[in-house]
Image: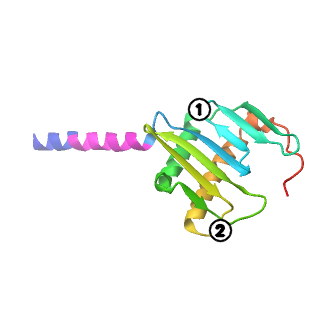
Amino acid sequence: MKLLIRCIVFCLLIMLMGSSKSEYPKDFNFIFRYGVMTKNLVDTFSDKYTKDLVQDGVVTTGLTLSNDEKKRIYEYMKKIDFFHYPEEIEGMNLIPSSGYILEIQYNGKVKVFKWTGEFNEDKKHQEFRGLTKLIIEILESKESYQSLPDSKGGYL
């Protein structure tokens, strides 16, 4: 009887541990702004993407991230302990000014984080850089992103 109870408890623990790894919060959504003057924007609340075309202004299109893509982003955030980052980090200052703003909803909470400037070789810089690269790579793989016009010109 003791063996049966131990087996049941063990199986329940395995099931609970497995399910927590495979899920992310049902309310997980974010707005991610990046680039010069943070004009590029993805909004998973409204499934839209805005691209900075520099000389030609901005253009907005529909863009939806799959649950698997959002889960990958959330898991990376957990891996780098992003949810314990301060509200703002200042990186290396460059002109023109660029940076990142992340507004995240998860587990009934909201976190707003701002990164100003560029990255150096510090661990936290490289971890956050990895997060931004992951998000941008996912965006750029989307057909709706690829169908947007190229940016013209540049910033001084």
Q: Quadrant of the N terminus?
A: top left
Residue 104: horizontal and vertical position, in percent?
54, 42
Type of amino acid under label 2: Asn
> Is the magenta region chiefly helix, strand or loop?
helix
Task: Please give left or right for residue 147 compared with residue 9 in the image.
Answer: right
In depth, the one of 21 and 48 nearer the eye is: 48
Q: Is residue 15 magenta?
A: yes
What residue sits 84% from the left and 46% below the top? 54
Q: Quadrant of the C terminus?
A: bottom right
What residue sits 62% from the left and 49% below the top? 101
- Secondary structure found at label 2: loop
What residue sits 75% from the left and 37% below the top? 145
What residue sits 62% from the left and 62% below the top? 90
Magenta segment range? 9-21
- Secondary structure found at label 1: loop
- The furthest residue to the left: 1
- Rendering quarter of residue 116: bottom right
Task: Please give left or right for residue 72 compared with residue 57 in the image.
Answer: left
Task: Please give left or right for residue 60 compared with residue 13 in the image.
Answer: right
Type of amino acid under label 1: Phe
Dot 2 alpha-carbon crowd within 10 angstroms: few under 14, some 14 to 19, many 20 or more? few
Dot 1 alpha-carbon crowd within 10 angstroms: few under 14, some 14 to 19, many 20 or more? some
Q: Which mark is residue 45?
A: 1
Q: Which mark is residue 120?
A: 2
Residue 113: horizontal and vertical position, in percent?
56, 51
For the residues labelled 1 and 2, say whether their Cβ atoms are less than 8 Å apart: no
Residue 80: horizontal and vertical position, in percent?
50, 57
Q: Earlier in the sequence, mark 1 or mark 2?
A: 1
Residue 75: horizontal and vertical position, in percent?
50, 47
